[in-house]
Image (tube, helix red, strand yellow):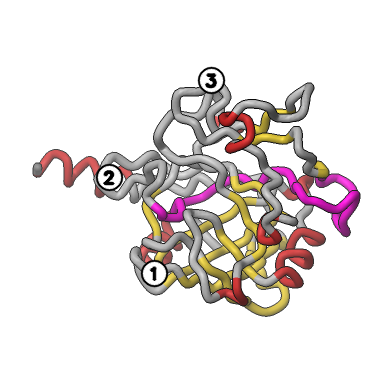
């Protein structure tokens, strides 16, 4: 137990893993590990200094709060690691990926990739599938139960606009690890924010649309999500905004 504790402490205090070339960050801070409420901020780096852009806004997270995710930060070996179905949002530092939505087009940076979701678009959450935590575009309309359950378009307004958070993703190099969590996005919150999520970060549509319009892939944006206590403790060592 003592050796495990030393491993855990060492892992979470390693130097920051935010790429030096990253000059844009969405930062989410919660009151604690078990909170599903988050305050979000947009920062941009000017020279060596991170500067707040605009004002903070509110969002919702997984029903059970946070657990360490798999991203750009040091890997964590403890019982707090995110698992598939735990209803926790992944904590740590993550690359921000592409935007998806129901509309033919959205307001966005010209360099941000946007894909209009159709009935043929799947996002696989089946841990036994070789496509686990990947976007899969079928050559045909879904026919099997498996295909239908994996459809990105389920007639759910909350998923009408979304931005991918690269947790446990092939962007990391290699491939997603089955069981460590999948399909993590920024998307529209439900019932005016009165409902938590299964692990995604949600907010009102206007805030999400505005945030997406500002995301610039050339700035190599990242998402930093941590409880307040961890953010304060790691801020200097990890050189966070």
Sequence-first disc among 3 and 1: 1
Is 102 included in the stretch rendered in magenta? yes
Q: Position of residue 9 (x, y in %)?
A: 25, 49
Q: 39 or 237: nearer the eye? A: 39
Q: Is residue 127 placed above or below 184 in the rendered structure?
A: above
Give the SS element for disc 1: loop
Along the horizontal axis of the image, is 178 left or right of 145? left
Q: Is residue 206 placed above or below 216 in the rendered structure?
A: below
Disc 3 and disc 2 in contact, CB within 8 angstroms: no
Say which quarter of the image contains residue 44.
bottom right
- The label shown at residue 10 is 2
Which quadrant is the C terminus positioned in?
bottom right
Q: Residues within 10 Å of mark 3 (few under 14, many from 20)?
A: few
The residue stretch that appears in magenta: 87-114
In front of the other: label 2 or label 1? 1
Q: Position of residue 217 (x, y in %)?
A: 76, 46
Give the SS element for disc 2: helix
Query: Which residue is depicted at the point 18% across and 44% down?
Result: 6
- The label shown at residue 130 is 3
Disc 3 and disc 1 in contact, CB within 8 angstroms: no
Q: Is residue 109 placed above or below 72 in the rendered structure?
A: below
- The label shown at residue 35 is 1
Sequence-first disc among 2 and 1: 2
Q: CA distance from mark 3 to mark 2?
A: 33 Å
Q: Is residue 77 placed above or below 175 in the rendered structure?
A: below
């Amino acid at each position: 137990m003592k050796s495990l504790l030393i491993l855990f402490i060492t892992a979470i205090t390693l130097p920051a893993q935010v790429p030096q070339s990253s000059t844009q960050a969405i930062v989410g801070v919660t009151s604690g590990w078990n909170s599903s409420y988050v305050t979000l901020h947009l920062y941009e780096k000017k020279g060596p200094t991170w500067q707040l852009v605009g004002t903070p806004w509110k969002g919702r997270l997984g029903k059970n709060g946070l657990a360490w995710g798999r991203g750009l930060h040091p890997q964590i070996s403890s019982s707090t690691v995110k698992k598939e179905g735990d209803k926790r949002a992944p904590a740590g530092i993550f690359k921000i990926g592409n935007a998806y939505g129901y509309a033919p087009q959205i307001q966005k940076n010209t360099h941000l990739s946007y894909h209009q979701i159709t009935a043929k678009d799947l996002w696989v959450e089946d841990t036994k599938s070789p496509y686990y935590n990947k976007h899969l575009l079928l050559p045909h309309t879904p026919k099997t139960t498996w295909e239908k359950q994996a459809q990105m378009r389920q007639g759910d307004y909350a998923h009408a606009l979304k931005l991918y958070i690269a947790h446990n993703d092939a962007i990391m190099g290699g491939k997603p690890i089955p069981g460590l969590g999948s399909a993590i996005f920024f998307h529209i919150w439900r019932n005016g924010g009165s409902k938590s999520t299964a692990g995604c970060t949600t907010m009102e549509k206007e805030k999400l649309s505005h945030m997406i319009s500002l995301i610039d892939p050339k700035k190599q944006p990242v998402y930093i999500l941590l409880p307040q206590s961890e953010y304060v403790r790691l801020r200097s060592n990890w050189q966070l905004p």
